[in-house]
Image (tube, grey):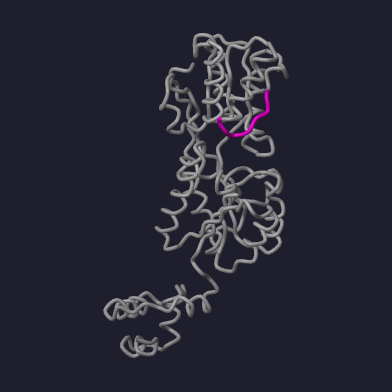
Amino acid sequence: MKLEDIAEKAGVSRSTVSRVINGDRYVSEKTRHKVLEVIENEGFSPNPAARMLVTQRTDVIGVVLANRVEEVFSADSPYYFSNLIQGVSDTAHDHDFSMLLWLEHSRESVEQFYQRILKNRLMDGLVIAASVTRENLLLNSLLKSQTPFVLLGRPLQYEDQISYVSVDNVQAAQMAVQHLLAQGRRRIATITGNLDDADGIDRLEGYKRAIQNAGLTVDQALITEGRFTRDWGYLCARTLLQRGTPIDAVFAGNDAIAMGAIQAFTEVGLRVPDDIAIIGFDDLPIATQNAPHLTTIRQPILQKGARATILLIDLIEGRGQQPTQILLPTQLVIRQSS
C-alpha cells in the first residue's frame, strides 16, 4: 500500500498523510486520528529509508564505550557496563529508538576509533560513557558539528557546554571516608582509580576533603595511584605495605580495586576489618560474593544510562536546547569490611 492509498481512504491529501507519519505537530487531532486509524486498519508500515529522507532522522542512538572490547567484558567490568547499556537500551526502546553500540577495537588507535564514529551517518545522537582527557578529539568534533550527545560522567573540559549525567563523586567519597573516621580510623589510605578520568579525580578530591575536614593532614604516603581494576588494587595495596607507613583503613576507587586490596592484605596476614577496614565504590555483585562482604558506595548505574538517554532524546527532538547536568544520589552501604 502506498501513501496515495492511505490518503484516498482517509479523505486527505498525500502530503497530509506524510505529515502525520512524520509527527508534524501542525496536523489537527481529528485529521491525525483519521489517518492513523486507516494506517492501523490496513497494517501499513512506512518505508524507513523514505521516512529518513523526509525527517532527516534515523531514530538510532549511538552508545560509545571508549574502552576496548576485552576491558568491557573483563571480570572487573561486565556488571557496570551491562547495567549502563541496559539503562540506555530500555529507555531507547520505550521511546521507539534503536541503539548502536560502539566499542574500541584492539587493532585500531583511539583516533581511528573516533573517526569511525564521526563518519557514521546512521545515528541521531550519542551517549558517551567516557570522561577522560583523550575524548577531546571526539567532543571537539561533536560540538563543532552540533551533533546531539550526552556524557555519562563529568567532562574534564567544556563542562558548561555539555549535557551529562553522573553522581557527586566528591561528596560520595567524603561520605565513605567520614564513615571510616567515625569508626576511629585515623591512618586512612586511598587507592585511586584512573586519574585521567573525572570519577577518579573527584573521588580522590573527596578523600582529601574528608581528611582535612577532620583536622588531619593529607599524607602523600597514604595515596597510591591505580586504575579501576582488581589487579591494580592488588598491586597498589602491596605498594602501600612496602612503604611501611602505618595504615588502618583504605578507601578504594571502586569495588574491583577494593577486592584486589583485600586479597593483598589477607596474603600478609592482615584481617579485614580488625586490622584494616576497606570501603569500595559502585556496589557491584562482587561486593557480596566473598567474605568479608564489602562496605561500599552504591551508585545508580542503570538509572545513569536511562537519564542520559532521556536527555539525549530531548536534544534530538528539540526539547532540550541548553546543556543540562544531572547528579544522581549515592548511598553508603555498610557491610562487614568496615
Residue at position x 48%, y 59% in the image: 99
Q: Is residue 215 left or right of residue 89?
A: right
Magenta stretch bounds: 224-230
Assign the magenta stretch its main secondary structure.
loop
Residue 329: where, in percent of width, then height?
Answer: 50, 35
x and y percent of residue 3 in the render?
A: 39, 86
Q: Tell whether position 110 is magenta.
A: no
Residue drawn where x is 44% and y is 19% of the image: 292
Asked if residue 224 lies left or right of residue 34, the reply is right
Vertical relation: 179 (above or below) 34 = above
Residue at the location (55% across, 68% down)? 122
Observer-nearest of 140 and 247: 247
Relative image position of residue 270 (x, y in whole percent): 54, 11
In this rendered view, identify the residue nearer to me: 288 or 185. 288
Residue 35 vertical position relative to residue 93 in the rendered view, above or below: below
Between 320 and 58, the residue placed more toward the observer is 58
Q: Quadrant of residue 185?
A: top right
Q: Is residue 227 magenta?
A: yes
Say how many tags the image has: 0
Name the residue located 70 percent from the left edge and 56 percent from the top edge.
Answer: 111
Q: Pick the quarter of the image with the N terminus.
A: bottom left
As drawn, 52 above or below 141:
below
Q: Position of residue 306 (x, y in %)?
A: 46, 49
Q: Residue furthest left?
A: 41
| Quadrant assignment, res 13 | bottom left
